[in-house]
Image: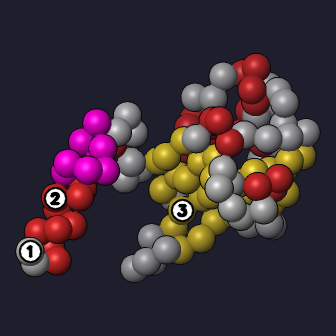
Amino acid sequence: MQGKALLRHYRDFQSGFKQWDQRGHASEWLLFPQNLGPQLSLDETSLSRGELYTILTNKAARGGKGSVVAIVAGTKAETVIEILKKIPERQRKKVTEITLDMAGSMDRTDFYGLNK
């Protein structure tokens, strides 16, 4: 079996990709509210070809399993807020600290509604 055929078979049948609940919007955003913790980090990064993403991580996971809370295409605060507000307010209120760099695109005092 050729490599491309094997990858396609894995994606289409073994991985569960076609039944994945985030498949429809995965190119724009991913959200893992089960990974939310009291201390978070927010940063923007360029993954490839200059595409910018905003990534919210749980500090307690230390970069391991359960680290990623959200990945949002772009760096506009309004877009990130819209996605993070999909997390139930009860969970968002548990956040006590968010560390971020000094990027101008993230200059918001309401910080994404996580504590509202």
Circles 1 and 3: CB atoms closer than 8 Å = no
Residue 74 seen? yes
Q: In this view, does 56 lie above or below 51?
A: above
Among the two numbered marks 3 and 2 on one chain, the one whose residue lies closer to the N terminus: 2
Say what secondary structure mark 1 lies in.
Answer: loop
Label 1 neighbour load within 10 Å: few <14, some 14-19, many 20+:
few
Which residue does the numbered mark 3 point to in the structure image? 53
- Judged by depth in the image, the label closer to the viewer, 1 or 3, is 1
Residue 79 location (% of width, % of height): 55, 44
Image quarter where the N terminus lies is: bottom left
Please, what is the three-letter code of the amino acid marked with disc 3?
A: Tyr
Magenta part of the chain: 12-19
Q: Identify the residue at horizontal 59%, vertical 71% (top origin).
A: 45
Among the two numbered marks 1 and 3 on one chain, the one whose residue lies closer to the N terminus: 1
Among the two numbered marks 2 and 1 on one chain, the one whose residue lies closer to the N terminus: 1
Residue 25 location (% of width, % of height): 37, 42
Say what secondary structure mark 2 lies in.
Answer: helix
Image quarter where the C terminus lies is: top right
- In the displayed structure, does residue 11 sit left or right of residue 88? left
- Judged by depth in the image, the label closer to the viewer, 3 or 2, is 2
Label 3 neighbour load within 10 Å: few <14, some 14-19, many 20+:
many
Q: Is residue 39 above or below residue 3?
A: above
Q: Identify the residue at horizontal 51%, vertical 67% (top origin).
A: 52
Circles 2 and 1: CB atoms closer than 8 Å = yes
Magenta stretch contains residue 55? no
Residue 108 location (% of width, % of height): 77, 47
The CA distance from mark 1 to mark 3 is 35 Å
Please, what is the three-letter code of the amino acid marked with disc 2?
A: His
Which residue does the numbered mark 1 point to in the structure image? 1
Q: In this view, does 90 lie above or below 78?
A: above
Which residue does the numbered mark 2 point to in the structure image? 9
Residue nearest the observer in this picture, 54 or 33: 33
